[in-house]
Every structure is written in structure tokens, then in C-alpha cells.
């Protein structure tokens, strides 16, 4: 069996995707999860990758022993090969990858804005935050229009990331609840967020 | 031959450059049209295809994937691997595939760190956040040291997605931060980089 170690932080949405994938695929028992002290000299990731970033995955047994993966898309592709939970491949490979890439770009934007908004007063750039807010508003409107497409499969890598991004928006962009203006997307998100894999990885 | 896809890019985007270099290295310029767009303006052509408005974006206009809109350079490069007659850069399976994936992801994380720092400098000066800039600078320095110790591993494989992106990282750092030349203290990495940067595909796509 493939024994692996997954380095994460409880609030990283990209790490959360990997933690959800491990649970949905039923491989979580083979994965040791370590809450890394990033942004401190004790950061455990630095021992395995000079990037120091989470999520990071090390493969500790089997043919890929010694492999160190960073970047959530790669980690999730790797993890989703194993286990016997439902497939996360979606209906067709390239449209599924396209959804995953789109969700990644959407989440990047939320993460940038979230990071800026937590800086001290006077060190937040209003023009950058406005640009990202507009980008997110466009994405939310687009996703609301495409809910039938999202709902066409129960779960997949791209759908997990869209739901994680929507959840992270609620957490980080305080005072801007997107749900009232996007009711169909809100229903879909609520169903995803109720899955045990999402509940078990709720940020704290 | 008619184009089967269009790559929307901006001339200074390092992630878009990865796709542009792959197009040249695979000799598929006749199959993938390249269009430079202005991002951060309302006329941004990417917005006609995707609400994020980000480059690079690949629009597939013909064939079985007609209508596909791909974002994220690693996915775009994986798709470009399927176009043309050259063998794919990414091994189809086995440990070699995952070793390449691991190095590509590492390069991506480093590129993000350099790009974030650049992005911070685009803000008005009073909004540039010094602790963040210092933190990302240290991350890049750590990676350059690590890569210097792994040059043999880099040189063992001639050209793949990860090698292209690592060379772009090194080049982009020199382009954006000319006063912080990483080369003097990493001579072996500098030598590997110079050979990559001398390829016609790198010269043609220089920012």
C-alpha cells in the first residue's frame, strides 16, 4: 500500500482540496496529515521542499517512494489514482480539466484578495482589491448560469475545487455573502459543503 | 493547414511563455495561433471566453475538443502535448511521469513566488507590503540554492515542461529584479540556464 504524508494548514483552500480528495477516494487511512507551521522557521515542509509551500505530499512507500509533490492540482491527480471511492475524473477528461483550471484561477483571485484584506490598514491596495472583486463577481455570475453543468456529475476534482473556492469566499471575504444573489449556486454549494469530506476539513 | 487552437497570451506573462515555448519546440506554430491580448482592460479578449480574464488561455476551435477553453499553463501545456507529431514532453505513465510532474510543480511554485513579488511592486508604492516581499524573496533564494545542488538532475533530461518552466523562472527573476542577480553564487545553475536561454524558442519569446 502507498503510505503518504500530506502537509497542510487548516485554512489553506488548496490543501483542503487535497484533503477532500483523499477522503472521497477512501485513501485517507494511508495518508498521515501534518499541520505545518508555515511562515515560521519550524515549517516542516522546508525539510522536504525548498518551496516551503502547502499542500505538499511525500510518498513514503511503493514504486514512487521518495516522490515530493507540491501544487494541489498535481497532488490531487496523484491521490485520485488510488482508493476505491467514486471516480473523480468527471464525464470527460478535457472538459473536466478545463473546469479544474477555471476553478483554480477563481480561487487564486479569492486567495490574493483575502491575503490583501488581512494586511494592516494603509497597506492594502484599493485598486488591486477592486480588480479582484470584479473578477470574482464575473465568475460567480458565470457559475450561477452553469449550475446545471456542475450538477450533472455528483463529484469530481473540478467540482470539489469550485465548492472549496465558494466556501473560501464566505470565509475570507467578510461582509460579502455571495449566496443571496446566486440562489442556484448557493443550493449546489450547500449540498457539496454537507458532504462528510467537506465537514471533516472545515477551516478553523 | 488550418489552426486548431488559439493561445491568448500577454508578452510578459511567464506562464504564457511556457506555452509559447512549447509551441515552438513542438513545431506546431501552424496549428496554434498566438494572439497577444491586453489584460486588466475592459477590452481584454479573454473575457469573451472565460470570466477570470486570465492569460494564458487556450481556445480549441476544431477537432473533438472544439469549444474547450483551458486556463492554467500546466493544463495548457499538457494539451499542447497532444498536438502535432512530436512525442509528448510528459511521459505517459510510470515513475518517470511523476518525477516530471513533481519537478514541474516545484517550478510552478517557484514561479508563483516570483510573480507574486512582482505583482506587489505593481501596486502604488504606499501599498507595497514589505514583509511579504521579503518573505517571497527568501523563498526564491532558497529554491535557487536548492536548484544549484540539483543541476545534474536538471541536466539529465534535455527538455520537458519542468525544464522549460525552471529556465523561465530564472530568466524572469533576472528580467524583473536585475539588481538581484542570482547567478554569481550559483555558477552551475547559471551555466545550465545560459544553455536553455540560448535556444531559439527562448530568444523568440523573450519578454
Image (cartoon, rainbow, N blue to C red):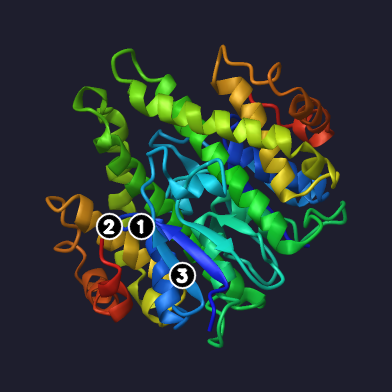
Q: Is residue B43 left or right of residue A9?
A: left
The mark lying in front, picked from 3 and 1, is 3
Give the label on residue B33, or none: 3
Q: Would residue A1 be seen by someone viewing this image from the given angle?
A: yes
Mark 1 Cα within 10 Å, few/some/many (few <14, many 20+)?
Answer: many
Point 71% across, 55% down: residue: A96
Host chain of mark 1: B
Q: According to the image, label 2 marks what residue?
A: B172
Q: Earlier in the sequence, mark 3 or mark 1?
A: 1
Q: Are marks 2 and 1 in contact (CB under 8 Å)?
A: yes
Give the label on residue B14, or none: 1
x then y, percent, for residue A46? 43, 47
Q: Is circle 3 on the same chain as circle 1?
A: yes
Q: Is residue B56 left or right of residue A35?
A: left
Give the label on residue B167, or none: none
Q: Is circle 3 on the same chain as circle 2?
A: yes
In what quadrant of the picture does the C terminus of chain B appear? bottom left
Amino acid at each position: 500500500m502507498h503510505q503518504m504524508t500530506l502537509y497542510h494548514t487548516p485554512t489553506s483552500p488548496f490543501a483542503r482540496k487535497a484533503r477532500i480528495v483523499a477522503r472521497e477516494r477512501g485513501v485517507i487511512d494511508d495518508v498521515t496529515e501534518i499541520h505545518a507551521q508555515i511562515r515560521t522557521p519550524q515549517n516542516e515542509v522546508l525539510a522536504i521542499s525548498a518551496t516551503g509551500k502547502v499542500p505538499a505530499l511525500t510518498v513514503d512507500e511503493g514504486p514512487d517512494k521518495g516522490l515530493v509533490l507540491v501544487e494541489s492540482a498535481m497532488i490531487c491527480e496523484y491521490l485520485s489514482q488510488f482508493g476505491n471511492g467514486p471516480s473523480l475524473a468527471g464525464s470527460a477528461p478535457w472538459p473536466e480539466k478545463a473546469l479544474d483550471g477555471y476553478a483554480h484561477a477563481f480561487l487564486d483571485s479569492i486567495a490574493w484578495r483575502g491575503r490583501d484584506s488581512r494586511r494592516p490598514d494603509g497597506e492594502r491596495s484599493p485598486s488591486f482589491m477592486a480588480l479582484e472583486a470584479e473578477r470574482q463577481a464575473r465568475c460567480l455570475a458565470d457559475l450561477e448560469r452553469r449550475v446545471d453543468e456542475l450538477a450533472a456529475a455528483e463529484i469530481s476534482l473540478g467540482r470539489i475545487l469550485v465548492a472549496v473556492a465558494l466556501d473560501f469566499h464566505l470565509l475570507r471575504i467578510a461582509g460579502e455573502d455571495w449566496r443571496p444573489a446566486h440562489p442556484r449556486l448557493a443550493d449546489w454549494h450547500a449540498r457539496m459543503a454537507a458532504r462528510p469530506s467537506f465537514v471533516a476539513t472545515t477551516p478553523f | 493547414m488550418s489552426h486548431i487552437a488559439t493561445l491568448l497570451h500577454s508578452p510578459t506573462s511567464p506562464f504564457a511563455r511556457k506555452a509559447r515555448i512549447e509551441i515552438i519546440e513542438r513545431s506546431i506554430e501552424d496549428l496554434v495561433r498566438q494572439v497577444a491580448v491586453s489584460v486588466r482592460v475592459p477590452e481584454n479578449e479573454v473575457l469573451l471566453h472565460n470570466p477570470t480574464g486570465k492569460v494564458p488561455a487556450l481556445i480549441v476551435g476544431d477537432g473533438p475538443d472544439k469549444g474547450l477553453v483551458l486556463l492554467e499553463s500546466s493544463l495548457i501545456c499538457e494539451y499542447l502535448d497532444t498536438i502535432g507529431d512530436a512525442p509528448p514532453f510528459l511521459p505517459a505513465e510510470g515513475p518517470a511521469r511523476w518525477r516530471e510532474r513533481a519537478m514541474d510543480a516545484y517550478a510552478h511554485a517557484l514561479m508563483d513566488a516570483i510573480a507574486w513579488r512582482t505583482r506587489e511592486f505593481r501596486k502604488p508604492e504606499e501599498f507595497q507590503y514589505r514583509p511579504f516581499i521579503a518573505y517571497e524573496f527568501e523563498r526564491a533564494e532558497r529554491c535557487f540554492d536548492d536548484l544549484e545542488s540539483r543541476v545534474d538532475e536538471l541536466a539529465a533530461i534535455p527538455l520537458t515542461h519542468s525544464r522549460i518552466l525552471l529556465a523561465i523562472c530564472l530568466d524572469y527573476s533576472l528580467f524583473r529584479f536585475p539588481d538581484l542577480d542570482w547567478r554569481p553564487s550559483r555558477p552551475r545553475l547559471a551555466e545550465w540556464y545560459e544553455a536553455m536561454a540560448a535556444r531559439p524558442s527562448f530568444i523568440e519569446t523573450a519578454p
